[in-house]
Amino acid sequence: MAKNKAQIVYSPAQKAIRVLLWVLLVCISVIVIFPVLYIILGSFKENQELLVGGSNIFPARWVTQNYVDAWNQANFAVYTKNSLFLSVGVMLISLFVSSMAGYVFSRKTFPGKEIIYGIFTAFMFINVGSVSLRPLYELATNLKINTSLWPVILFSAGGGQATYIFLCRGYVNSVPRELDEAARIDGCSFFQTYYKVIIPMLKPVMATIAILSFRQGWNEYIMPRVFTMTNDSLRPLTVGVNMLKNAGDGAAAWNIMFAGATIAIIPILIVFICFSRYFMGGLTSGAVKG
Amino acid sequence: MSTKPYVNPQLAPTTRTPRPADKKMRLKESGGVAAWVMLAPSLIFLAVCSIYPFIWIFRYVLYNYDGIPAHTRFTGMRNITNMFADAKFWSSVGTTFEYALWKLVFIIPLALIMAVLLNQKLRGSSFFRGVFFMPTVISSSISGMIFMFIFATGNGILNGIFQKLGLIAQPIGWLTDTSVVMASVIIMSVWAGFGNYMLYFVTGMTSISEDVYEASRIDGANAVQTFFRVTLPMLAPVLKVVLMLAITGAFKDYEAIMVLTNGGPGTRTNVMFLYIYNLIFGTGSNATRQIGYGALLSLMAAVIVGAVTIVYNIVAKKLDDVV
């Protein structure tokens, strides 16, 4: 790499162009960051300042009262707890289900395998939108499990599993079969091979799935909205903060909504900054292969 | 943010020899029961979350159903004739096409240009890549809300900045004026999504060999020529996949639009999946749920998206033959 760099010599004109391109990238980055920065900084403004508007990004006076109000009065403590429960639940179930299915799909031949695999693929492309939430909602009501967030967790994990299974299967395919056979000779059963040999090898793709499914659960909106229509105490942040918009005169609660939206994006941004390579890696490997 | 892009080993070009298909080489297969048990959770999920709702839709297509089982009535072909006469639905289909077209026109070139710039290995490329990708990790409901604040007519910051700079005399009704609201929706969805497609392009470009660029440099190609004669042709397979994802993605968008404008003002930004959502959950202007009718429209919407995908594939294939 270093050797390669040394070979490239830029003429003054090229250097000027490169500086210009760099400036362009900086400008676009500013535009991209702006909305997020605006909502975070705005959450420290007084409501009066937000309602008047203007062109200031930074608060005239920094206040943290918005967060105190959101947390205590607007029920955001509960929403945050629900969001965490929902996203961790989706993450754990997705990891569990997709790693096993990916392993079986990669290592086993059994009658009907291609058909089952084909059905998984087909339902990734068949999209009937929100209408599928209706039967699931009625199912949860009939089973009387709609008093918790569990149906949302299960249906979310179930809806997103295909991508993760494909990721896992592709990764298990790249693990040499000789390892399985060595384990088999040492007396491991099919399942033991999975959790003693394959799982440790799967760490990178499991990390990707963990992150992607956590984001999926954290960002889920329509489904929890439908399932918690009548139950405020089950709402995750995405739904809770949007419900404020409809509550009474929405304009009055701008400061709470700013604080709520900030609470909803900060955790996922921190996860993204720490694990950005898994976000990006999972996305591209799934798509190009998929 | 890490400096090196994470590349899944399965993407890396390898020259592994194909495995021998000869079963005799392998140990005797065992653990058939274990395999089915391990597959069971995902099969149950598939049955409950994908297959069951799909069949359920067909069950209600010819019924009038408002969510109360006792009210369910068979109405024969009424839903179907209603659908063809439903001007609101077909106008929402038109809106969806308008939205998808404008979104694609802006998001694909922007993603491609950004990917090319990042590929120049300028200082801080991985930082820029992280920044451009960042909006895609935010929930579409929250990004809809953020832009609702930014685009607010009276106290929104965009009007504030434009007025301060003297660009506009009167505040623009970003979300209330029927002639600009579509632009606002497009701005939001491009912001929220272009990082995704950019990343596909970046990944595609890293697999183009450095030798090809060197050869074109030696032949005296300038940057523009290099892009059109080298990068773009070699990127064609990736471009085709990305376009396909972008098209189907654009037709499915409705969460963020629901939060930003809720289809308004009037029905100016009422895309078809939003219209259907309001029918099924009775949250629109008409408070009665029409689930049977909504189920039929969902199928129609799925058919429309499917048809667009097929047309795109034919066109892409034709282009392949020409180029």
Image: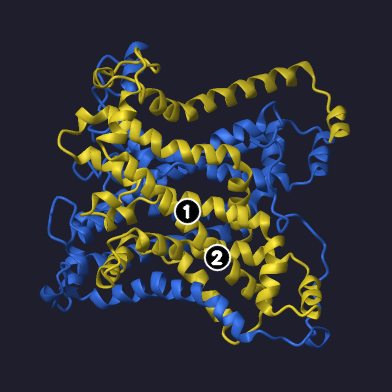
Chain colours: A yellow, B blue
Q: Residue A88: which disc?
A: 1
The crowding category of the residue bearing disc 1, from other C-alpha atoms within 10 Å (few below 14, some 14 to 19, many at least 20), is many
Amino acid carrying label 2: it is Phe
Residue A283 placement (x, y as % from top left): 58, 51
User: Dot 1: what SS?
Assistant: helix
Q: Are marks 2 and 1 on the same chain?
A: yes
In the rendered view, tell whether residue B40 sits above or below residue B23. above
Which residue sits at x=85%, y=32%?
Answer: A2
Q: Quadrant of residue B179?
A: top left
Q: CA distance from mark 2 to mark 1?
A: 12 Å
Please indicate whether residue B136 sits to the left or right of residue A75 in the image: right
User: Quadrant where the C terminus of chain B lies?
Assistant: bottom right
Q: Quadrant of residue A185?
A: bottom right
User: Quadrant where the N terminus of chain B lies?
Assistant: top right
User: Dot 2: what SS?
Assistant: helix
Q: Chain of mark 1?
A: A
Q: Residue A122: which disc?
A: none
The crowding category of the residue bearing disc 2, from other C-alpha atoms within 10 Å (few below 14, some 14 to 19, many at least 20), is some
Q: Is any part of residue B106 visible from this angle?
A: no
Q: Nearer the viewer, residue A181 or B73?
A: A181
Amino acid carrying label 1: it is Val
Please indicate whether residue B275 sits to the left or right of residue B202 in the image: left
Please indicate whether residue A254 sits to the left or right of residue B102 in the image: left
| First in sequence: mark 2 vs mark 1 | 1
Question: Label 2, on which residue?
Answer: A96
Q: How many marks?
A: 2
Please indicate whether residue A218 sits to the left or right of residue B206 in the image: left
